[in-house]
Image (cartoon, rainbow, N blue to C red):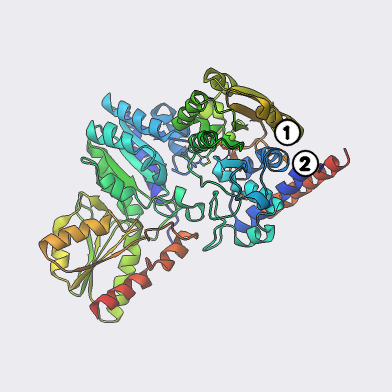
Amino acid sequence: MNKISNRQVICEVLLENAKTDKDIVVLCSDSRGSASMTPFFNTYPEQSVETGIAEQDLVGISAGLAKVGKKPYAFSPASFVSTRSYEQAKVDCAYSDTNVKLIGISGGVSYGALGMSHHSAQDIAAFAAIPNMRVYLPSDRFQTRCLFEALLKDQKTAYIRVGRNPVEDVYEEGNVPFEMDKATVLCEGDDVAIVATGEMVKPAKDAAALLLEKGIHATVLDMYCVKPLDKEAVIKAAQNAKAVITVEEHSPFGGLGSMVSQVVGAACPRKVVNLALPDAPVITGTSKEVFEYYGLDAKGIAKTAEEILK
Amino acid sequence: MENLKALSYELRRDVMDIIMAGKAGHIGGDMSVMETLVSLYFHTMNISPENQDDPDRDMLVMSKGHCVESLYAVLAKKGFFPLEQVLKEYSQFGSHFIGHPNNKLPGIEMNSGSLGHGLPVAVGMAIGEKMDGRSARVYVVMGDGELAEGSVWEGAMSATQYKLDNLTAIVDRNRLQISGTTEEVMHQDSVEERFKAFGWNVLSVAGNDVEAMNAAFDEAKAFKGAPTLIVANTTKGCGSPVMENKASWHHHVPTQEEYDQIMKDLKEREEAALHE
Ligand SMILES: Cc1ncc(C[n+]2csc(CCOP(=O)(O)OP(=O)(O)O)c2C)c(N)n1
Ligand SMILES: [Mg+2]
């Protein structure tokens, strides 16, 4: 089982690039430990800004830095950066068009037993609703690296959500198909199309393997780019299948499921089932317990597929 | 009267057991805030399981909600729920005893966890109490790192605008947050001067001295015309040198060895307090 978390990979990529790119600035709000950014703060103190427990300040300062030519990467738990500093993200990053990368760490239900204040089941919906804001949820450590290498090259704001714990690999070292803003097709089949994002991609991939044992053929899309959504890939997958399942660690409203349903409904109507967290405070437990409980694991996804194909 | 000093050490041992049982918790801030909570629940506030639905009861908002384990220990001792239930359920699958205050549980008024919310909420409660002419008092406990949140200062302004002498705020001034000292991370000195500048009545006391806290709360009750801030100057991890004044103990779960040593130290301090 992989021991390297996606947040650690982000730190590695930024450390490598900050050596030559002195405009890279990392900002934390008493969150450098949970962001895995302590090595960056220690190596490049002159390229680091600590704001204390002040997420509005974090994002406002980032926008100001970007305005004068810096490339800020602001890290804070997804629960706080997507709510407390939402207006700064909307006005100072997206509306003013500043090159601020917002990284929501410990996303989704990573902080299982800490309760709803610490869960971010609304961040995709919130950020996707802001014009000019992009939303990315990388699925594993290899894709996280590809994504950040791509983000380093662009000049626009984006929100990236990662979880707290290491996730099992979806890809293999040296074999990571990645094209910016294009979904990655993990497998193709003409019974059901499963569109997943972030840490739900691995269970979706495993579900496809379970289904294959039963003679059910699934397409699995790794939709790390929730916005801009790769509509073409969604339509192609849906057209070839009898039904579509979306899987996300998010509220059932306004996230990947809503967006995929809109596209499928308009372009090639099919039955679409959205697997997501409930519209309620999430049950207390570890991520694993929570996912199992709500059918967001490989078994649950496969079961849903079998039921809708009946 | 009960020996509240000894009680504070006894309840710290309950906190240790809660954290060991759930393998989680914010031990440093739990230990620093203990005398504040003991003074509130066993000396200051008009609150008990018997009057928990009475509109005239005093109310606490635990704004530094991550230190819920100390609140669980105190509420259990007050009889709101059995300690055994906390030990069994805290942080477990499906439990209401989560890592932050949750008002699905008896004795907890408001949910928290995201820092910087408590003071504005307490201001609203205090304004409401005054509107309805009730004598209930409102208390809010904040961390010192928490003071970096702008919302704290919006609340601080409103509290004096509305002359909320029924509101007492406490800052657990342990001088540490997650990433280091408050002065390194985001300076807070002087908390006293800042709140005075906002028009508050400010008391600065030894926050791990329960007698001093009792006296400060009495003084706050008597003060008219403005809200009172009590700066409780505390030691993070107070109770054993193993954990005192160490940023790394913000949410460290003790090893068995550390646990044994800390329990021994706490027991010694409790015994000493009983024989003072
Ligand atoms: C809005 C918000 N940002 C970040 C956090 C994460 N967090 C939990 S505890 C903590 C440090 C709190 O320090 P302080 O207020 O000094 O509390 P204490 O020392 O009493 O534990 C942080 C940053 C949070 N709970 N809420
Ligand atoms: Mg502190």
Q: Nearer the viewer, residue A25 or B15?
A: B15
Q: Are marks 1 and 2 on the same chain?
A: yes
The disc placed on residue B4 is 2
- The percent coordinates of residue A288 (x first, y second) are 45, 63
Dot 1 surroundings within 10 Å: few (below 14), some, or many (20 or more)?
many
Q: Nearer the viewer, mark 1 or mark 2?
A: 1
Q: Amino acid at mark 1?
A: Asn
Residue A109 appearing in the image: yes
Q: Amino acid at mark 2?
A: Leu
The disc placed on residue B214 is 1
Give the residue at the far left of this rendering: A267
Residue name at image x 46 percent, y 39 percent: A32
Residue name at image x 51 percent, y 29 percent: B185
Which of the two labelled residues, at mark 1 and mark 2, occupies the earlier sequence position? Answer: 2
Q: Nearer the viewer, residue A35 or B58?
A: B58
Vertical position of residue A287 compared to residue A34: above or below:
below
Q: To which chain does the residue with label 2 belong?
A: B
User: How many angstroms separate mark 1 from mark 2 (CA)?
Assistant: 10 Å
